[in-house]
Amino acid sequence: MPRAGLDTTAVVAAGAALADEVGFAGLSMGQLAERLGVRTPSLYKHVVSQDDLNRRIAALALAEAADAVGAATQGRVGCDALAAAAHAFRGFVLTHPGRYAATIGVEPTGADDPIAVSGSRLLVAFTAVLRGYDIPPQEIDHALRAVRSLFHGFATLQSAHGFQWSADVDESFQWLIDLADRGLRSTSSRSAGVTPHGRRLDS
């Protein structure tokens, strides 16, 4: 029986949930219609196309990831904030692999595109973490790309079952966080004219 009160938000949420179950690559309008108990043409009252659905799922995933990272880092600074952000982000990707996969390689059409807006919120959440390290302004973008690359890479590899050897994955992830923390602190020390061993460069 068709579901009453179906709207775009409900369709996108159902699509995101289905993508998490079957994989983003396997998501189709036909499957989604069956899940929602409607005929496939009925979905086009709420989303324009498969691509439109995919982009809406990507925007939703980025917004949810931003919320997860922002909530986890609230009131934390330095390594505590970095670790909280890392675990929140990794947890989101592992819990929602299909919807997060929708974000990979998608390009916003402009500054007001929901993908750009949600993506900016995620960047802001990670940038707030970096502020606790006193990174020089001219290096913030580099630090942000490095941190996102580290945590994105680890989470997506784990999600795809890319770690097959015996070492504990959680221990490896903590090792990665510690590595990122040392690198960020080193960058901060260099900007202050101090070596990693605590000696001033001009002494």
Image: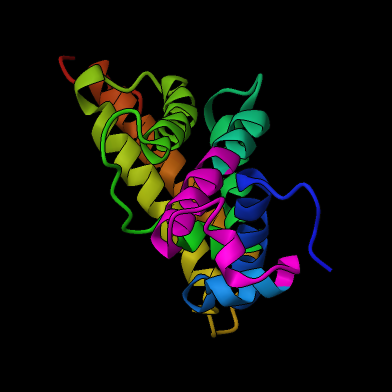
Direction right: furthest residue: 1
* Colour setup of the view: rainbow
Residue 89 lies, in percent from the top left, at 57, 47
Looking at the rendering, the stretch of residues picked out in magenta corresponds to 35-64
Which x, y percent locates residue 137? Answer: 25, 18
Q: Residue at x 52, y 58 (%)?
A: 44
Q: Main secondary structure of the magenta part?
A: helix
Q: Which corner quadrant holds the C terminus?
A: top left
In the picture as drawn, the residue positioned furthest to the left comes out as 202
Q: Is residue 12 magenta?
A: no
Which of the 4 image quarters holds residue 75? top right
**Residue 12 x, y percent position in the rendering:** 60, 52
Q: Which is more toward the observer, 200 or 108?
A: 108
Residue 83 position within the rendered picture, expressed as x and y whole percent measured from the top left:
59, 41
Residue at 33% in and 24% down? 188
**Can the viewer see residue 117?**
yes
Q: Nearer the viewer, residue 4 or 121?
A: 4
Report the number of discs. 0
Residue at point 65% right, 70% down? 33
Say which quarter of the image contains residue 109.
top left
The N terminus - image quarter: bottom right
> Can residue 97 be seen here?
no
In the image, 117: left or right of 77?
left
The image shows residue 29, relative to residue 142, as above or below, that is: below
